[in-house]
Amino acid sequence: MDKIELEDGTNVIAGTEFTELISVTSDWYRPSDTKGSPFSEDKWIALRGRFERIIDDCRPVECLMVQMREPAYQRDQVSIETIVRQTQLLQSSGGLSREMTQLFTKDSQPLFGAFPICDANGNPICNSANEPFALRFGLFRQLFVCEGPSYVSEARPFPGPRLIEFARDASRLLYQLPAQVASSLWRNWSEGFSRRRNSDEYFWLDALFELSWQGQAGEVLNSERYAWRGNTSVQLVGNGLFPRMPSEAFVSASTSIPHEYGYPMAWHAKLPDLARASVAAIDELLRRGRTKPAPLTVPDQVFISYSHKDKKFLNDLLTHLKPYVRSSSVTAWSDKQIAPGSKWLDEIKAAIERTKVAILLVTKDFLASDFIHEFELGPLLKGAAESRVKILWVLVRACSYKETAIKDLQALVAPPAKPLAEMKAERDRAWVSICEGIKSAVNEPVD
């Protein structure tokens, strides 16, 4: 099988729609949800000066990151000692981590991958019919702070605890970044992570590496990622959490580096001078903090929430709405508009932010979908409570909607005594009435 484009860190084809259930803790941090104080420019500038003094006064200290994949059945063949043996280790600790997750369809059904991922014993993770479960790898990181290059004429000392103290201060400031800057920094961690487990100086080192992979070759803050085995290494490609081996290495039968479909069991990256990298990182964060976010657009679109098992009714609604869309009196959005290769969940969240009116096509499958409940209905109900969104709904099939918050919302076919699916000749008239109700809602001022 030729190398194919995959969603980052998964065995599913790029552009596949999926959701994943992530276990979160009470201290969970999501970059996009940051509600901190205004950008602390003065504090960052002062910290930048402290790092600059280390550059002048002390020898360089480098940092090596090793990211191990979960599961990884050949981890014993990628000994970390091979990577760190040529440097004097000063200290080390763990960095960011995430658990392996199973992927599901939007309707909470198991999703299957393009190839099987093996468990820690090397056995394919499949169902009883040998269909490979769709999975996203877990990971854990180890960070090693080491002495940098030593020259005969070098008289400067190593920075000692000062560098670690400054890194710890930087870690605290990271949690005060505004959402726009935090989201751009942690773009590979949009689901978030535990704040309690990531609050020491190593959190700043994680941030340095994340920024270094967003930079350009030749810049001070730039590093590449390499997979290895023994003395053999291959530079990886990709900007996500799980870079892959390039095509020529991937297809080579002689490649000794253990991998699954181009995903190595582990990889490493290095920053040769932590102080210089810190100054460059602060400069980049200051630049991003000074960049004004794009003005918020006035919500005007209609968001259609539905179960994929009810696509026929979505298509009927879009057909009846077409004259309104053509005349620009209504702007309708559904997940059918998500382009292949896009980050599916991010696109849905962005669409909800632009929503003035939400239409729910309610059926038993709609109510049963955990994805709709958590990622669509939840945010929409919150928006309605804050008078930002008006929610209308259509009873498409008989279901237990009276057991949900939907019962308190305005139905577009009132009273909803007869579900749309049970209508015959009168169904088109119902769709016309529904579209007129949508247009009226769009034209109403937001409270």
Image (spheres, rainbow, N blue to C red):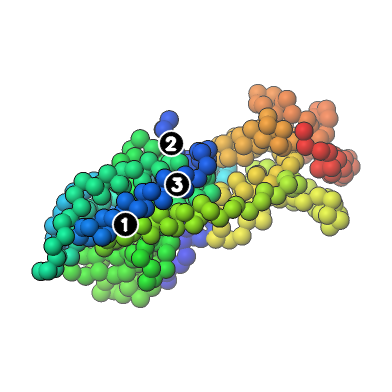
Secondary structure of the residue carrying tag 2 is strand
Residue at image position (31%, 47%) is 167
The first of marks 3 and 1 along the sequence is 3
Number of other residues with Cα within 10 Å of mark 2, as a class: few under 14, some 14 to 19, many 20 or more? some
Q: Locate residue 238 relative to residue 80 in the image: left or right.
A: right
Residue at image position (26%, 63%) is 272
Q: Distance between the residues labelled 2 and 1?
A: 33 Å
The answer to which quarter of the image holds residue 99 is top left
Secondary structure of the residue carrying tag 3 is helix
Q: Which residue lies furthest to the left in this view?
A: 152
Q: Where is residue 183 in the image (x, y as percent from the top left)?
A: 50, 49
Q: Distance between the residues labelled 3 and 1?
A: 15 Å
Secondary structure of the residue carrying tag 1 is helix
Which of the labelled discs sits on residue 28, or is there none? 2
**Labels 3 and 2 touching (C-beta < 8 A):** no
Residue at image position (83%, 27%) is 415
Q: Which amino acid does label 3 sit on?
A: Asp
Nearer to us of marks 3 and 2 is 3
Count numbered badges in the picture.
3
